């Protein structure tokens, strides 16, 4: 039965390698590391994209727009003002969460947030 190799022992062996051999081993290690990380990164990217694409519920969005239109006309009741305030708060929470996920995805892809948004076809949300 083979004896398990300890990391300090491996490091000691690596120190004895010629620079060209060490470069070759480093390349193998980088490939191994990338292969092991790739599935997790792809999974996390998929999770982030799903969260980014999850938007405001359609019925709530329709109601929000209707209330905004009525507010501009000056015809909101006190109850509707409160409803609009609650919907606005929820909309801001969703947009903040989305922005956090976009920033995380940009970091994973080693790009800027504006470049990622362009790549995904996402335009900044206009305030109501």
Image (spheres, rainbow, N blue to C red):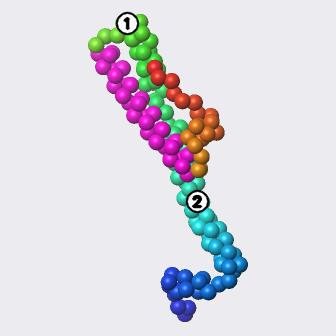
**Is 93 a magenta residue?**
yes
Q: In this view, does 54 lie above or below 2?
A: above
Name which quarter of the figure residue 94 lies in.
top left
Does 14 sit left or right of 47 as displayed?
right
The residue under the point 59% across, 50% down is: 109
Q: In this view, does 122 lie above or below 128?
A: below
Label 1: how many Cα within 10 Å (few below 14, some 14–19, many 20+) = few
Q: What is the residue that sits farthest to the bottom in this orientation?
A: 1
Counting the numbered discs, the total is 2
Can you give x and y, in whole percent of width and height, for residue 96 in the image? 43, 36
Does 125 sit left or right of 85 as displayed?
right
- Answer whether residue 38 is visible to the viewer in this image: yes
Query: In the image, which residues are magenta?
Result: 79-108
**Is 123 a magenta residue?**
no
Label 2: how many Cα within 10 Å (few below 14, some 14–19, many 20+) = few
Q: In this view, does 41 lie above or below 4?
A: above
Task: Give the structural element (helix, strand or loop) at label 2.
Answer: helix
Point out the image quarter for the N terminus. Answer: bottom right
Q: What is the residue that sits farthest to the front in this orientation?
A: 19
Task: Give the structural element (helix, strand or loop) at label 1.
Answer: loop
The residue under the point 34% across, 22% down is: 85
The one nearer the camera, 62 or 97, is 97
Separation of disc 1 and disc 2 at Cα? 54 Å
Q: Nearer the viewer, mark 1 or mark 2?
A: 1
Q: Name the residue under label 2.
A: 39
Q: Name the residue under label 1.
A: 74
- Answer whether residue 28 is visible to the viewer in this image: no
Can you give x and y, in whole percent of width and height, for residue 34 in the image? 61, 64
The residue under the point 62% across, 65% down is: 35
Can you give x and y, in whole percent of width and height, for residue 37 in the image? 57, 62
The residue under the point 58% across, 43% down is: 112
């Amino acid at each position: 039965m083979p004896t398990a190799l300890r990391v300090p022992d491996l490091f000691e062996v690596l120190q004895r390698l010629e620079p060209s051999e060490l470069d070759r081993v480093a390349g193998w290690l980088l490939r191994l590391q990338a292969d092991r990380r790739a599935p997790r990164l792809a999974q996390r990217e998929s999770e982030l994209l799903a969260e980014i694409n999850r938007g405001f519920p359609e019925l709530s969005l329709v109601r929000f727009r209707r209330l905004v239109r009525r507010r501009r006309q000056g015809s909101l009741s006190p109850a509707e003002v409160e409803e609009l305030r609650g919907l606005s708060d929820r909309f801001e929470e969703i947009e903040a969460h989305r922005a956090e996920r976009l920033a995380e995805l940009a970091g994973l892809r080693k790009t800027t947030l504006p470049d990622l948004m362009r790549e995904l076809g996402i335009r900044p949300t206009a305030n109501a």
